[in-house]
Image: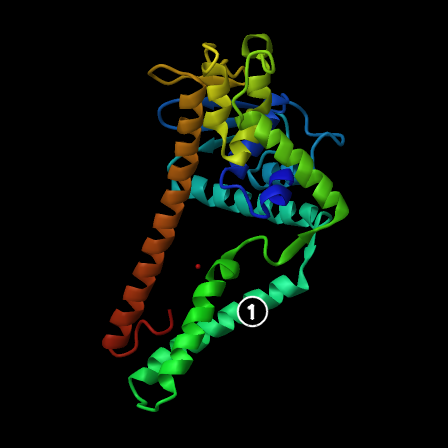
């Protein structure tokens, strides 16, 4: 939620970051090898120690009791669950962030005007081919200029929202922590060797903010090896370290979602082909996300 309020958009790695945080807190264990990753519940999911966003994610993954395991692999089934879990997570994040972000009337209006002008520009381009009226060029130029000016606002995630007083406070604290994770500083200000436990503790935040490499470099800049992550078990081949762990886990998530998207695309293509063939044959396929 903090990252959503800070940037007013969802983190690209929000699913991974949430799982890392749950693992760091002892709720989950992550076990990886060359083929897949296992997410295992190691602590009873009772009480109020889980945020609603975390509970929504775990429920979508089918992880509701200690001992249950979900496997992230490059399969359609795994990708379907991962995609559903990311959707459930982001839906709950939006609900939780609504306390800190309210709709901005002027922002919504500017976005609407931008899209209206884009539509007008496309309309004028179409008119160019069928109408030789003298007004086409001034109107086309005017709408094009406004559309180009408003293009950034039309897709800017934070344009249509404004932070509440509580949101500004959370924005300030989240932004300050992001600067701590990424800003180079002297050993007197941050003694990496004396805070090896901070790396896995804050890795989830660094992942969500997209600055995991910068967080690791703060240790490397002082000649300190990036600390191991104790809540990960690696059973694959090759040398294992924190950076490769993130890459491997991200790769598993991406492979799963790609496999699901490819299966959906293939299904849509197959369905379209079947309909076309039936229609051409005299009606057999017409009856048949």
Which sits in the foreground, 246 or 202?
202
Which sits in the foreground, 274 or 80?
80
**Circle 1 residues within 10 Å: few <14, some 14–19, many ≥20:** some
Rendering coords of residue 80 (x, y %): 46, 45
Rendering coords of residue 100 (x, y %): 71, 47
Left or right, 1 with reference to 226 = right
**Residue 269: quadrant of the picture:** bottom left
Residue 100 visible at all: yes
**Residue 108: quadrant of the picture:** bottom right
Which sits in the foreground, 93 or 164?
164
Colour scheme of the rendered structure: rainbow
Does residue 167 lie above or below 160 as drawn? Answer: above
Which sits in the foreground, 286 or 126?
126
Looking at the image, the residue that sits furthest to the left is 281
Rendering coords of residue 226 (x, y %): 47, 15
State the residue position of label 1: 112
Numbered label tally: 1
- Identify the residue shown where x is 52% and y is 59%: 153
- Identify the residue shown where x is 68% and y is 29%: 45
Quarter in which the N terminus is drawn: top right
């Amino acid at each position: 939620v903090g990252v959503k309020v800070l940037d007013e958009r969802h983190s690209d790695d929000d699913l991974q970051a949430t799982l890392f945080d749950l693992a760091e807190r002892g709720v989950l264990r992550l076990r990886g090898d060359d083929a897949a990753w296992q997410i295992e519940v190691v602590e009873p999911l009772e009480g109020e120690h889980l945020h609603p966003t975390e509970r929504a994610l775990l429920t979508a993954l089918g992880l509701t009791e200690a001992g249950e395991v979900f496997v992230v692999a490059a399969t359609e089934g795994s990708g379907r669950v991962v995609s559903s879990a990311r959707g459930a997570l982001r839906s709950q994040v939006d609900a939780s962030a609504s306390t800190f972000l309210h709709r901005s009337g002027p922002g919504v209006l500017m976005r609407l005007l931008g899209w209206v002008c884009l539509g007008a520009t496309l309309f004028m381009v179409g008119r160019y081919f069928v109408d030789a009226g003298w007004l086409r060029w001034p109107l086309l130029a005017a709408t094009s200029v406004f559309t180009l000016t408003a293009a950034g606002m039309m897709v800017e995630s934070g344009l249509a929202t404004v932070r509440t007083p509580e949101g500004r406070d959370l924005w300030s604290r989240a932004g300050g922590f992001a600067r701590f994770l990424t800003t180079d500083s002297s050993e007197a200000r941050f003694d990496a060797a004396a805070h090896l436990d901070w790396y896995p503790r804050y890795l989830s935040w660094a992942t969500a903010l997209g600055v995991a490499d910068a967080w690791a470099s703060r240790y490397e800049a002082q000649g300190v090896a990036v600390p191991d992550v104790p809540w990960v078990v690696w059973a694959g081949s090759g040398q294992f370290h924190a950076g490769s762990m993130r890459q491997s886990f991200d790769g598993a998530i991406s492979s799963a979602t790609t496999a699901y998207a490819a299966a959906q695309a293939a299904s849509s293509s197959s369905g379209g082909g079947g309909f076309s063939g039936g229609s051409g044959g005299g009606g057999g396929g017409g009856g048949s996300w």
